[in-house]
Amino acid sequence: MTGSEASPSFRLAYVPGVTPSKWVRIWNERLPDVPLVLVPVSAAEVYDVLRRGDADAGFVRLPVDGTDLSAIPLYTETTVVVVPKDHIVAAVEQVSGEDLADDIVLHPEDDPLDWERLPGRPALERPAVTADAVELVAAGIGVVIVPQSLARLHHRKDLTYRTVTDAPESRVALAWPEERTTDMVEDFIGIVRGRTVNSTRGRSQAPAAAQKDRGAAKSTPRKPATGGGARRKPASGQAGGKGGGRAAAKNSRGSGNGGPKGGAKRGRPRRGS
């Protein structure tokens, strides 16, 4: 066995900004005997970690690097601009790229956004990582546009952020090496896709014998409830079977109790003439 099948735990990598706590909680409820180990990694390292087998699966940002990894897109992040609290942008709820035309827009090397053209004025140098870019914003050097999760991760009291309406968006996905799609990976896929605990989708198929038994049970015709074969509807005028007994009883009640076809009609008594 290879991958997570040979490991006593399930190792889950995640890049900065992604919060896996919800899925970890569900995993712990469903598989309490299999510890889930979180592996925080940078966006630049996550794919090497997965390929080396140092994690069974990981939360990444699309696009996925290479064709040897499988990925399931999960959600799209809101894009925001991080600015000092006294910046003019802080007075509005959202901005466009044109509103930042006069600002120096920092472009960190680990930027997950796919820009055709970065708005604003370019900085002289690119910060190595987003955390460095946020520090420069706090120093009044410029502004930086990032996924909202990264703005929250690097939050500072002297900074704020606002939505950028026309910026590229970041998509978060679950990725894993395709050749190591183990049962535990399938279990976690089911969790992030919202499957119930009783769902078998995504897991390895049941043994062939069990499937054959279930198929045979479905294909076997049901026997009649009684040994006399299928019941036929009694011919007109015959009181056969239970239906005839009920009909006879009904007719006898009708004739004995003054029904519509026999006996005196119920109602007020006739007045004498």
Image (cartoon, grey):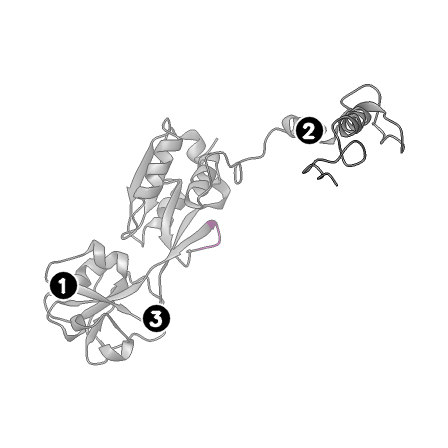
Residue pictured at 45% horizontal, 51% vertical: 72
Is any part of residue 82 visible from this angle? Answer: yes
| Camera-side mark, 3 or 2 | 2
- Quarter of the figure that contains the C terminus: top right
Residue pictured at 32% horizontal, 45% vertical: 20
Magenta highlight on residue 68: yes
Q: Position of residue 140 (x, y in %)?
A: 11, 70
Horizontal side of 266 relative to 107 (left or right) equals right
Is any part of residue 126 visible from this angle? Answer: no
**Which structural element holds mark 3?**
loop
Question: Which secondary structure type mostly characterizes the magenta part of the structure?
Answer: loop
| Mark carried by residue 159 | 1
* Residue ID for mark 2: 212
Q: Which segment is the magenta one? A: 66-70
Query: Quick one: which residue is furthest to the front in this view?
Result: 273
Within-10-Å neighbours for mark 1: few <14, some 14–19, many 20+: some
For badge 1, the amino acid type reads: Leu
Cα distance in 3D space between marks 2 and 1: 63 Å
Query: Quick one: which residue is furthest to the top in this view?
Result: 227
Q: Position of residue 57 (x, y in %)?
A: 40, 43
Q: Indicate which disc, 2 or 1, sits on the residue closer to the N terminus.
A: 1
Cα distance in 3D space between marks 3 and 1: 24 Å
For badge 3, the amino acid type reads: Trp
Q: Indicate which disc, 3 or 1, sits on the residue closer to the N terminus.
A: 3
| Camera-side mark, 3 or 1 | 1
Magenta highlight on residue 170: no
* Residue ID for mark 3: 115
